[in-house]
Amino acid sequence: MEREPFEQSQTTTNRRAAIDAWTVRGLGSALGINARVIQIALGMLWILDAALQFQPAMWHRSFVTQMILPMAHGQPAPVGWLITNVGHFLLPDAGVWNFLFASLQLGIGIGLLNRRTVRPALFVSFAWCLSVWVVGEGLGLLLTGTASALTGAPGAVILYAAVGLLVLPRRSEAGAPGEEPAVGVASSAAGTGPLGSVGALGVWGAVWICSAVLWLLPASRAHGALASSISSAASGEPHWYAHFLSGFAGHFAGVGVQSAWVLAIASLVIGLGPLFVSRPTAFLLAGAALELVLWVTGQALGGILNGMATDPNAGPLIVLLAIALLPTVVPVRASVRTPISSMLRWHRPTTWGIGAGIAATLLLSATYPVATASASSTSSHAHLQAATAMPAMSMPGPAVHSAASSSSRGTHKGSSTAAMNMAGAAGLGVVDPHWSYSGPPIPRGEASLLTQVSALTDGGHKMQTPDCTSPPSANQILGATEYVQATSEAVAKYKDLSVAVAAGYVPVTSPAYPVVHYVNPAYLSLKYTMDPNHVQSLVYAFTPSGPVLVAAMYLMPAAGQKGPMPYGCLVQWHAHTNLCYSNTTHQIVGFTPCPVGTYNQPTAFMTHVWQVPVPGGPLALDPSDLQTMQAAVQAQQDGTAPTTRPIPSPKSTAAVGTF
C-alpha cells in the first residue's frame, strides 16, 4: 500500500511521456494564451464598456427611453412588465443611475486586472450580466421573434458572463492525482477552467447553434433581410462608414432564404465541428473570422462610432471566446479520441437525445413560415424600407394616403380618452375646443379628396393602446411638455423644406397629394426612438403659399414593434392595417382588398408632434387631412410658417388653387 502513490506517479509520468511523443504545441501555446491573458482581455472590455457608459448621451432621460424601455416591445407580458417598471423607476434619476452603472463596470474591469480580485470581480459581473441581459437587452430579444445573429444576438452581456465563467480561477490550480496531461481543448485557457473541456465546448456549441436557429427563423429568412439589417446598421454612423455599409448591403439585396441557409450551415459546422475532431483550431479561427465580418457589417462595430453604444456588441466577445478555446497542445495522430466519441462512451442516450433536440429545433425554425409582413418590412433598399414602414402610398392618381391619424374621429369620439383631452391636460398650447377654420376656402375638389382619403384610412387605423384612459401624473405632464418642446426646437430648422432635403429626408408619398411625407432612412433604428435630434419623418402640407412643416413623426423601425409610452396616455402610437404593397417595388399602392400583384401588411407604429395648430394640440390623435391643411394655411396667415408666395386673403372667395 505504501508504494501506491509512487506507482501512480510513475504511471502518470509514463502517460505524459507517451503523450508528449505524439503531440505538438498548439496555436494557443504559440500565442501565449492562458487563463490570465483572457481575464485581462475581459477586464479591458469591461473598462471599454464603462467608458462608453460615460458618454454624454448616456446622462439624459433618453438613455432610459431609447435604450431600456424599447426592450419591452414584443416581449412576453411578464418580461415586458419587468422592463417597463424598471425603466420607469430609473427614469427620474437617469443620470445618477448611469453614473452608478458606469462605475460598477469600471470596478469589474479593474478587478479583473488585479490577480487577487479576479474571483470577486467575476462573481459581481455574473450578477450584473444577468440583470442587464434581462432588462437592458430584453433577453437578447430572443423571445420577440426579431433577434438576429447578424446584429449580435443572443446579446453581448451574456457572452461576458460565459467567457468569465470559463476562466474563473479554481480554488486549487493543481491537477488531480493521476490526471492525464491535457490535449486539445482540454489544454486551452477555457478547458483548464472550472467547466473543463466539456463546458468550454458546450458554450461554444450553444452560441453557434443559437446563431444557426436565428438564421433560420423568419426574421432572417425573409427576402432582403440581410441587406435590410446591414442598411439599418448604417444609421447614425460616420458618412464614410455608412457609405461602406450601404454599399455592402447592396450586394445582398436580392437574397433571402439562400443567405440564411448558408449562414446557418456555416454556424452549425463552426459550432459542432470541434466535437468531431481532435484538432479544432480551424473551426475556432473560422468562427472568429465570420464573427468579425458580422461585427464590421451588421453590428456596425457595436455602434461605438456614433456615441450611442453601451458595449462593443457580440463580435469581440465571440472572438475572445474562440481565443480562450485555442489548444496549447494538439495531437499529431488522427486516432486520438474525439470529444463526440468520449460523449458517446460517457452516456450514449443522453448524447443522442441532445442531438435530436438540436435537430428538432433547427427543423422547427427552418419550417416556420415567413409572414408577408416580415418579407415586406425588410425591403432591399433603405428608402423602400422607409416607405413600407409608413402609411403613405403612391397611387395611380392623386389620391395618396396621408399619415395624419384620422381614425380616432370614429373610434375615439365620445370615448373617455377624448373626453379627458390629454393634450389639454398637459397644457401644451391646445387650441380652443371649438376650433374652426378662418382662412380662405379650400377648393371643393381638394377638400373632397382630403376627406375621402381620411375616411379610407379610418378603416385600417389601429391604436397601440386602444383603451388608454389613465389620467396623466404630474411627472408625465411635465415630461410630455418637455418632449414637445424639444421636438419642436429640433425640427424648427426644417421649416425650410430644402434644409430637410439636404439633411437626407426623401419623399415617400406622391407629391400629387397635398400632404407629403419625408423620411430620413438613416434614422430608422431603435436607438433613435423618440429622439428629437433624429426624427424619422417630417410631414409637409403644400399650400398655395408654399410647403408648411405640419408635423414631426416618430416611427418604429419595423412593423409590430411597439412604441414606448413614458408619458402615459399623453403620447399614443397608431398603425394602419388596410394598405396594399406592390410585390415588385414594395411601395404602397392602395387600400384593401388588395388586387393581384399586391399584398397587405400593417405599418409600423407611429406618433406625431404637430407643428401647426390642429384641433387637439401638438399631441392630438385625430386631426383629419382637411383640418391639417387648414391649420397649415392658418399658420402661414399667423406668421408662424414660412411662405414662398403671397398669402391669399382670408375673405377671398376665389379658389385657393391646385396643390
Image (cartoon, rainbow, N blue to C red):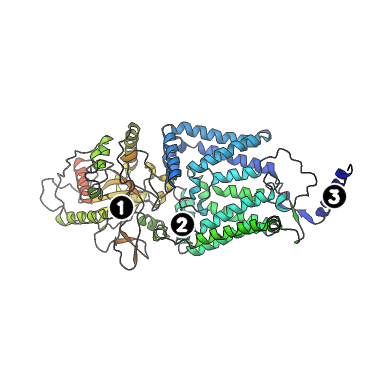
Kind of residue sitting beneath label 2 = Ala
Which quarter of the picture shows residue 211?
bottom right
Q: Is residue 341 above or below residue 494?
A: below
Marks 3,1: beta carbons within 8 A = no
Please tell me how crowded label 3 is: few (under 14), some (14-19), or many (20+) other residues with Cα within 10 Å. Answer: some
Q: Nearer the viewer, mark 2 or mark 3?
A: 3
Residue hosting label 2? 219
Please tell me how crowded label 1 is: few (under 14), some (14-19), or many (20+) other residues with Cα within 10 Å. Answer: many
Residue hosting label 1? 517
Q: Is residue 534 above or below residue 283?
A: above
Of the 4 image quadrants, the one containing the C terminus is bottom left
Nearest the camera: 484 or 635? 484
Marks 2,3: beta carbons within 8 A = no
Kind of residue sitting beneath label 3 = Thr
Q: Secondary structure at mark 2?
A: helix
Between the residue at mark 1 and the residue at mark 2, the CA separation in whole angstroms equals: 27 Å
Q: Secondary structure at mark 3?
A: helix
Between the residue at mark 2 and the residue at mark 3, the CA separation in whole angstroms equals: 56 Å
